[in-house]
Image: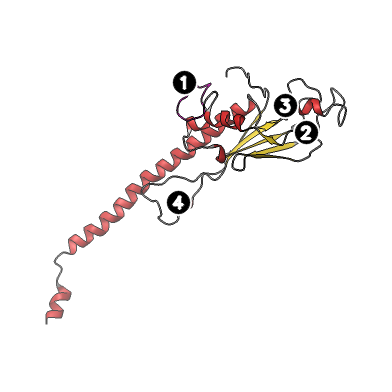
Amino acid sequence: MNVVRFVRDEAGAVLVEVAVVMTIMFVFILGSIEFLFVFYQWNAAAKAVQVGTRIAATSDPVAAGLRSISVAVTGTLSPPGGPMPGFQVTCNGSTASCTCNGAQVCPGGGAYNAEAMNTIVFGRGSSSCSDATSSYDAGMCDIFSRVTPANVVIVYAQTGLGFAGRPGGPVPTVTVSLQNLPFQFFFLSGFMGFTNLRIPALTTSITGEDLSSTAPVF
């Protein structure tokens, strides 16, 4: 008899239902806020890549010696005024190194210029984030504070522009992308593998029209 009464007893059923529904509602609401923050991180990272690409195209190249390539190839591979040979130099901030697709084309282009990378990430004349006084001084981490040199990959690729012996150096396509930068979660951290999600490369390219440490204000 007691077993039957216990089975039929509905006291506290509302409390159980409220607990279940409230749990689902909290997960949904907090999850929605979390995903809005994820979209913010995505957009901020994309803008940081755009800013970094612009700085990379108008400042000293991270691949030390890149500006001297067009002069170095004269008399060896191309006559003065001739077309520049194809090249691609990839600089990885994580390994602090640059690799070139051809030693003959890139004499000295494989050396890594840490100061140039810091200019791109932290901004002109800065070694930290969030201290830019103008858009000209802003670096990648001023836009998205979690970006560090280790998260940045820069590729300088010959596109057919420029010529051997050009005083200003080659005119490569400069491509900046991100790597190994995870999304930051607060409410859903550790839930269903969200902590393993990484921000995509978000690649941006631009023509390196003025690889110079005295680039004009943009």
Q: Nearer the viewer, mark 2 or mark 4?
A: 2
Mark 4 falls on what kind of element? helix
Cα separation, mark 3 vs mark 4, equals 41 Å
Looking at the image, tell me whether mark 2 or mark 3 is earlier in sequence order: 3
Quadrant occupied by the N terminus: bottom left
> For the point 72% across and 30% down, which residue is it?
66
**As displayed, is residue 186 above or below residue 4?**
above
Image coords of residue 33 (percent x, y): 36, 44
Cα separation, mark 1 vs mark 3, equals 29 Å
**Circle 2 residue:** 107
Cα separation, mark 2 vs mark 3, equals 11 Å
Image coords of residue 6 (percent x, y): 15, 75
**Circle 1 residue:** 133
- For label 2, the crowd category at 10 Å Cα-Cα, with few meaning under 14, some 14 to 19 and many 20 or more, is some
Q: Nearer the viewer, mark 1 or mark 4?
A: 1
> Residue 67, which numbered label?
3
Looking at the image, tell me whether mark 3 or mark 4 is earlier in sequence order: 3
- Answer whether labels 2 and 1 touch (C-beta < 8 Å): no
Quadrant occupied by the C terminus: top right
> For the point 82% across and 36% down, which residue is it?
104
Frontmost residue, 132 versus 30? 132
- For label 3, the crowd category at 10 Å Cα-Cα, with few meaning under 14, some 14 to 19 and many 20 or more, is many
**As displayed, is residue 150 above or below residue 191?**
above
The three-letter amino acid code for the residue at tag 2 is Pro
Mark 1 falls on what kind of element? loop
Cα separation, mark 2 vs mark 1, equals 37 Å
Q: Nearer the viewer, mark 3 or mark 4?
A: 3
Write the start and end of the magenta stretch as one range: 127-138
- Quarter holding residue 76: top right
Looking at the image, tell me whether mark 1 or mark 4 is earlier in sequence order: 1
Looking at the image, tell me whether mark 2 or mark 4 is earlier in sequence order: 2
- Quarter holding residue 9: bottom left
